[in-house]
Structures are given as C-alpha cells and as structure tokens.
Amino acid sequence: MFRIVSISFALLLYLLCYALMKADAKVLGYWAFDDKKDLGKDSSGFDNHGESKKEVVYTPKGKVGGGLQLDGTNWLEVPHHNSLNVKDQVTLMCWVNFEPDGASQDQSASLIYKNGPFILEGDKKDRRFWASYSLVKVRERQKIGTFAFEANTTEGRTITAPGDPDATEANRWYHIAGVADGTQVKIYTNGKKKAEAEQKGEFKPSEQPLTIGFDLRVPPEKGGRKPYLIGIIDEAIIIDKALTQAQVEEAMELGENGKTLDNFQEIFAVEFKGKLATKWAEIKAQN
C-alpha cells in the first residue's frame, strides 16, 4: 500500500513539475500605445520598441487609454530581435477599430506581422515570402473570411482559411487573437473561436522586422499591394505560448473594463522598476 502511495505521489509530483515547465512563457512584445511621446514603447522587457514610419499618430480614443491612429500610409516598425523568432507556439492579440475605408470588403490589412525571409531565386527574387507569423484582415471577397492567422512554416504555408466569416463594420472595436499551439492554429474574434487549421510544422525564423499596421512583403515602391490598416489599433501583444480560449476571453474582458494587459496576472507579474516579468503563474489546460 505504501509503495502504491509513494508511486502515486512521485507520479503526481512529476506531472506537476512537467506542467510548470510547460507553463514557462514569455511576453515578447507588448505595445499599449499609451505614451504619447513614445508611441512605439514595448513594455515586455525585451526592448522591442517600434519606430514610426511616415509619422504614426497618437489618439486618446484607444480601447484602453491611448491608441495608434493609422491612416493607410503609415505603420509602426519593430527592428528584428531574436526574441521575436518563435518555435512552434505563439499568441498574437490586439484591439482594432476600422474607419469606413478600412472596413471595406476590398481592404486587406496586416495587424501584427513578423515579416518572413526573402526569396532569393526566380522571378520573385528580393520579395519576402509570406510571414514568419501574422495576424491579418484579408479581403473578404476572397471568401476566406475576414481575420486570419497566417504563417510560413517548415512544411508549407499555414493559414486559418476559411477564417472568420463575419464582415467587419466601421467604428466598432474588435478583439482579435491568433493562437498556434504546435498542432493547430486558431483565430478568435471578440473571444469566440471563428476558425482553425492544421499547423504545418515550426515557424521559419526571419531576420526581418515586425510591423504593426502594415507588412513589407512586397514594398510599395516595388509595386506591391498595400495592406495598410486604416483605423486604430491598441493593446498589441505577442506571447511565445498558446493561450486557451478562456485566457483569450479573460484578456478581452480586461480591455472591455478599461484595463491594460499588465493586469492579466496569468501573464504579467509587475516588478517594482516598472518592467514586466514574463512568467505565467499557471497555465490552464489547453482546449
């Protein structure tokens, strides 16, 4: 009997330690857009600060405090850092509010976009090959939905298509989350899962920048398309682990209640110096 209890206790201890190891997570970038003088400020602790391209604008009308106002010509660009290359799990989240032109069914927009590696051969030389990982609004006329998670993975392109079937409306806030757990990718709109797809391997690393509100897949000066965000983006975050639906909902509820994500205790533990530690206290079971 004692032996059975000992074995059971050892097994329980192992599972607990394993769960804690799996729970170790990092916030790779968190842009709250609340500092009018430093709009690209990253509060993750990795100093992945964004640089204004074509004069991004602060607005006091963000979802939580201030926000990043984009007019279809500007974006925020985060220089590459190795912390932004993830292996096989990631969560991307943000709040977005489209102006009428941005909500158009013909308008695509890249919300959070880790630009992929260059193509080095053929007629598409010097163009970037999809994204290492991204959260995007696609053109609804393509019949693959509205919001999608898209990535360049080791076994091919990964995308939640068809994605969210609901068309966007102007002047309305949307909480968007893209989650990859190593086997599946999922897209959540306002806390509800709208689409999922098979994840085709690990994310391909890239030394290209991360952009918010635009992507550099084919630069406009080279005749590329223009997937600019026209509207406001707020509370953009990248985490190197997959959140559950319950956690996505919890993050959304913080925004609904006017609270920033540094109040999300499952992600952030606030240090005295104002920097944000990046370990979860616990991770709930995956969906």
Image (tube, rainbow, N blue to C red):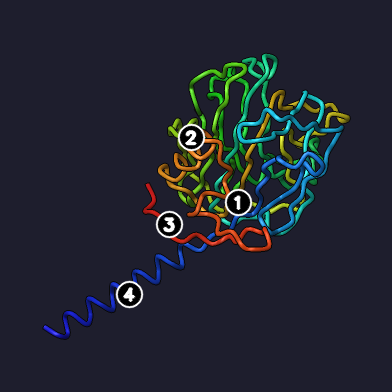
Which label's residue is closer to the chain start, 1 or 4?
4
Question: Residues at badges 2 and 3 in contact (C-beta under 8 Å)?
Answer: no
Looking at the picture, which amino acid does disc 3 mark?
Answer: Ile
Instruction: Report crowding for label 3: few under 14, some 14 to 19, many 20 or more residues within 10 A (C-alpha).
Output: some
Q: Find the residue positioned furthest to the front.
A: 272
200 left or right, relative to 233: left
- Pointer 1 and pointer 4: residues touching (CB < 8 Å)? no
Number of residues whose C-alpha sits closer than 10 Å to that of mark 2, classed few (under 14), some (14–19) or many (20 or more): many
Residue at image location 74% in from the left, 56% down from the top: 47
Please give the residue where the numbered disc 2 appears in the rendered image: 188
218 or 187: which is nearer to us?
A: 187
Q: Which mark is residue 283?
A: 3
Instruction: Characterize the local packing of mark 4: few (<14), some (14-19) or many (20 or more) Cα atoms within 10 angstroms.
Output: few
Give the CA separation, mark 2 to mark 3. Answer: 19 Å
Between 42 and 287, the one nearer to me in the picture: 42
In what element is the residue under mark 1? loop
Residue found 40% across the figure and 43% down from its top: 246
Q: Secondary structure at mark 3?
A: loop
Q: Residues within 10 Å of mark 1 (few under 14, many from 20)?
A: many
| Mark 4 lies on residue | 13
**Amino acid type, callout 1:** Phe
- Tell me the distance, in whole angstroms, between the alpha carbons under discs 3 and 4: 17 Å
| Among numbered discs 1 and 2, the one appearing first in the sequence | 2
If you read the primary sequence from the N terminus, does the residue marked by circle 4 or circle 2 appear first?
Answer: 4
Give the mark, 3 or 4, whose residue is nearer the N terminus: 4
Which three-letter amino acid code belongs to the residue tagged 2? Answer: Tyr
Q: Secondary structure at mark 2?
A: strand
Residue at the spot of label 1: 203
Q: Position of residue 67 (x, y in %)?
A: 69, 33
Pick the front one: 217 or 97: 97
Q: CA distance from mark 4 to mark 2?
A: 34 Å
